[in-house]
Amino acid sequence: MSLFANLRARAVQLFDNSDTGGIYSREQTKDELFRAKYKLPEPETPMQTVPVQLVAIESGGPMTGPTFEGDLTLSESFLLFECHKNARACCFALPLVVVRRVERLPSRNYLFALQIELYPGHAIIVNFNGLISGCEEFCAMFKQNLRTNLPLAKQARKFSTTFYSEYMVDFLEWKRTTPNDEASKPQPPEGGLGRTFGFPGDAKKLRDRAKVRLWAEYFQSHGRNITLICQPGFYKLIRVGLPNRLRGEIWEECSGAVYHRLRSPNFYESMLLEYTGQASLAIEEIEKDLNRSLPEYQGYQSPEGIDKLRRVLTAYSWKNPEVGYCQAMNIVAAALLIYQTEEQAFWTLNILCNNMLPGYYSRTMYGTLLDQKVLEKLMERTMPMLYVHMQKREVPLSVVSLPWFLSLFINAMPLVYAFRIMDIFFLEGSRVLFQVALAIFKVNGEVILAAEDNTKIVEVLRNYFDTLDQPCGFPARPGKPPVTKFQELMVIAFREFSVITDKMIRGYRAKNESQILTEIETFAKRTQLRNLPKTSHLTVDQTSLIYDKFYASVQEQRPGLGGHTQNLSFSQFLTFLSGICLSMQPKYISRKELERNDFIRRLFKNWDHKSRDELSLADVVAGVDGLYSGNLMDAMNCFFELFAKENNVIDENGILAMSEAMLLFMRPFSQQDGLLDRKSQLELNKVTIEDPDRMAAAQDEIRQQQSVRYLSAVSGFIQRAAAQAKLDGETVNVTHHMDLIDFNEESDTEEKPETRPAGLSLPSFRMVVLADETLEDFFSETLRALMDLAGGASYRSPVLALRSVVDGLISDGYRMAGEVRRRIDELDKSMDGLDLDTNVTSSDRSLLED
Amino acid sequence: MESSVKPTTSVKLVLLGEAAVGKSSLVLRFVSDDFQENKEPTIGAAFLTQKCTLANRVVKFEIWDTAGQERFASLAPMYYRNAQSAVVVYDVTKPASFIRARHWVNELKSQGSPNIIIALVGNKLDLTGEQEGQEPGPVVSRDEAAAATGDLPGRKVSYQEGEKLAQEEGLLFFEASAKTGFNVRKIFLAIANKIPLETAKPSTTGQIGGERPLELNQASTQDTSCQC
Ligand SMILES: Nc1nc2c(ncn2[C@@H]2O[C@H](COP(=O)(O)OP(=O)(O)OP(=O)(O)O)[C@@H](O)[C@H]2O)c(=O)[nH]1
Ligand SMILES: [Mg+2]
């Protein structure tokens, strides 16, 4: 026993330390890390990696260029490179469809070399310097993958025409070669609303033209859009703020959304088409906010802008029904659409909500809540004084920062500055939000510390955002304009807070995730239970238990993560039933059998009030409440209702179905190794007292008898019910005289003798039941006792579930014995308060009864 | 200034209600006497303050205007924690928003501060086309109401329904319009008047904090001078 206990304790410890059911507490897999690093879509996986020396050759230049030592990786449809010393020195993720030609070059210093020519004209030379076998293998695989991707190459050509960068380079080429040929003049591709309605901010002040020229230069030499090779110049150009016309494209490329658009060319359009005219809660919510998204921007005062916004948000909600629509997404999407086409914005929104900020906009918004907690922790670490000060406040400052994160600063700062932050955000990820938020607190730290109350703090911050374009008081470099508060903010965010790393943030998220989820779950449960209709039989604790089992059946994940399904499907209903009813446990009925069972189907249909083919929590609670009445009349009514036809009688088939249902419930008592019911237990007690040696033998005997008793009760029911049904049909006019027992008001009101066809009426059903003691017991107590609603356990997280598996493996025997005992205790208590734990009194009493 | 001689008390107030019923618009009307046709949805919550001058004192409202969408509801406790007063808003033209208001009232009753003062407000009265300030007769038939309103969406939640809920739960009750300004100040004045002097937190410099009212309550139970 102590060995077992030891084993169990160790196993539990092991499980407790690992998975708490969240998304950060789990280690990322190698594939996930790989995809995250290069922002690749699923299901790309790293197939082979070799160390190489890479030579990046500029288009049109000589066949030499800067060299980089690094790792070359091949995935199903990408070729990836990352420089060893510093990833930013050179890296790329090239879709294989952009490879035009691969040539094997002789090499003096290396094993061999490949020259890879890319479509826009630039090329790379790869010098292999690893083991020859590895390199040969890599090349073979590369060849194979190129072949697989070949059919898509044509599409990629067309795809490249959707980029402004491609147009820029084409235009420059046209100007250089045939500037007088109007016919061949390239046309810009479709773009964002800004191209029609203007871009926020003063383009001149933003030095938009100069930036465009610099980008053009970069694109010409380093490739562009999906053939881009990222070198330091690329990051610098992003830091100074993207030019208006390229912003949408770079956002798409930095976030990896572009690969999704490449991979699923017609997805967005067909999504919209497929769901045309369909209604949903998300659509209702979207409609409310369409006119409330960046309303000051011209484009959203016109139907064109509003329609685009509607389509993008709606398509997102159909693609991600578990998120649907969350306020703040309208603002983010509205911002995207100023710079991106609908399709670009759609994919970028997908990446943003699902990958970059998971859980931010979900039903429970756990990502948002978690990150505010993380922000507090980071403040505690980096600015302890401010943190302590903040803690004293009625509303913590993280509440102030919550909207910043949800709207990517768009509804806090003037648009031009929010977009500058977004430029960096799409490149570097959610860490940027933390860095900027911390910098804001830092810059305003002294004023916050001095402020006498919350009002003042909020005011200070609001003023701060409005004056971001003003000089910060820092001495300007000679000949340069004064340093603005925004520039100061950027420097503090990315220099001073460069100590904030992705790993650190992930660590804090993992540490705090479970607590946040538990808080959310507690809150959701409290709210839902409060809003449920009143129950007549179930106690608050029992309803709470049903809630737990309901959600455990609906979702595999923790409810705090806000999964989509809030209702039970039929299959989940089966899981739920096995959880709350002893007779439906796998021990007594197989899943397959349960699935086919007529009664279970009736139950599902009967509880499904709105005929949606799924059950809400309210449906289920009401349903169980009915079965759990523990009141003879109510239980019989409830059962009858399940089988009655519209005319309020049960026909012959119904009688058979009903008896099968009874048998289903009675299985724990009719099976050989089943439980003992109250009557059998009393008998056993008697034997135990009279002749303890005979107990074991008697137990089998009593079980046998019990089994026969149940089976014959049901077969008797069939016979009598069928006979009664016939009689009911023949003697329609005298039905009420057959009711020997007075059933109060109901039997009178049900009399409609003239129209009643053959079949068992409710009063007759009751009479047939009451004629048999076992059946009477079944409805008055057994049914209720079979409901397993005694546990008080709260939601079972995967840890708990695993723990119980361990428990189960080790102490299954004990548990089963305990279970049987508990059930019987309950049966007894519900009857006459017998208590088996105190043996003497219980046996005394059973003697007395004789 | 007059207010400088009167004692000032700070009162934390939270606004709750379904999305787009006009919570932010009511606050905007109260704080700046302004109205915006297309107000952006509130993300998380917004914080504003406004003073209300009564006969014998000044009440400074610290207003937390919350986001209305269902999924933001789990954030609400952060904002209504320690709030001495709440305004639960619904839209008189949207029955669903009235159901949501009922839920908010229940939540505040069970999770909010024990003696929280709640005002129930049916907003967008202007959309009913009824004459302002003229309370509708005991029974207005839907047809009549519709006929009177022309193109307007018309009233879908009767005055009586709102009044009944308010009576059952002991709430202040108003129908108002942020657009026209009708009854808006009245809501806040009524709350201010109901704030007992001793539970409102005095806005003394450097002594703010949610624990404040609690501390005061505790102190008053020890203090025999408390008037119970
Ligand atoms: N006709 C009319 N429209 C109103 C009134 N109050 C608000 N509105 C409009 O209703 C819309 C929503 O108003 P908001 O004040 O933003 O609503 P809210 O309750 O703060 O919404 P959330 O922040 O999303 O929870 C806006 O377009 C307002 O112009 C009113 O009294 N009458
Ligand atoms: Mg609002």
Image (cartoon, rainbow, N blue to C red):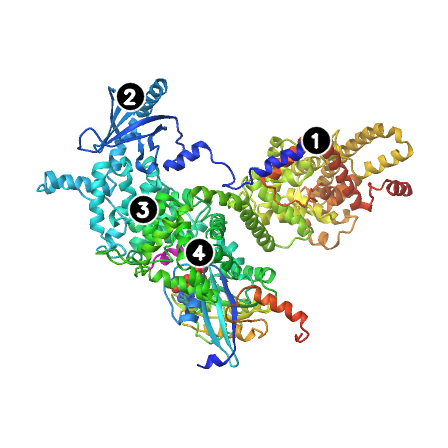
On the same chain, marks 3 and 2? The answer is: yes
Q: Which residue is under mark 1?
A: A4
On the same chain, marks 1 and 2? The answer is: yes
Q: Is residue A96 above or below residue A314?
A: above
In-front residue for pair A573/A542: A542
Mark 1: which amino acid?
Phe
Answer with mark 3 or mark 2, whichever residue precedes in sequence: 2
In-front residue for pair A100/A205: A205
In-front residue for pair A671/A543: A543
Name the quadrant containing residue B161. Answer: bottom right
Q: Which residue is under mark 3?
A: A342
Work out how far the residue at label 1 is from the one at label 3, CA to CA, in angstroms: 61 Å
Mark 4: which amino acid?
Ser
Which quadrant of the picture is home to ligand 2?
Answer: bottom left
Name the quadrant containing residue A54. Answer: top left
Q: Which residue is under mark 2?
A: A110
Work out how far the residue at label 3 is from the one at label 2, CA to CA, in angstroms: 48 Å
What is the secondary structure assignment of the residue under circle 4?
A: helix
Work out how far the residue at label 3 is from the one at label 4, CA to CA, in angstroms: 29 Å
Disc 3 vs disc 4: Cβ atoms closer than 8 Å? no
Mark 3: which amino acid?
Glu
Mark 2 or 4: the one toward you: 2
Answer with mark 1 or mark 4, whichever residue precedes in sequence: 1
Magenta stretch in the rendered image = A286-295
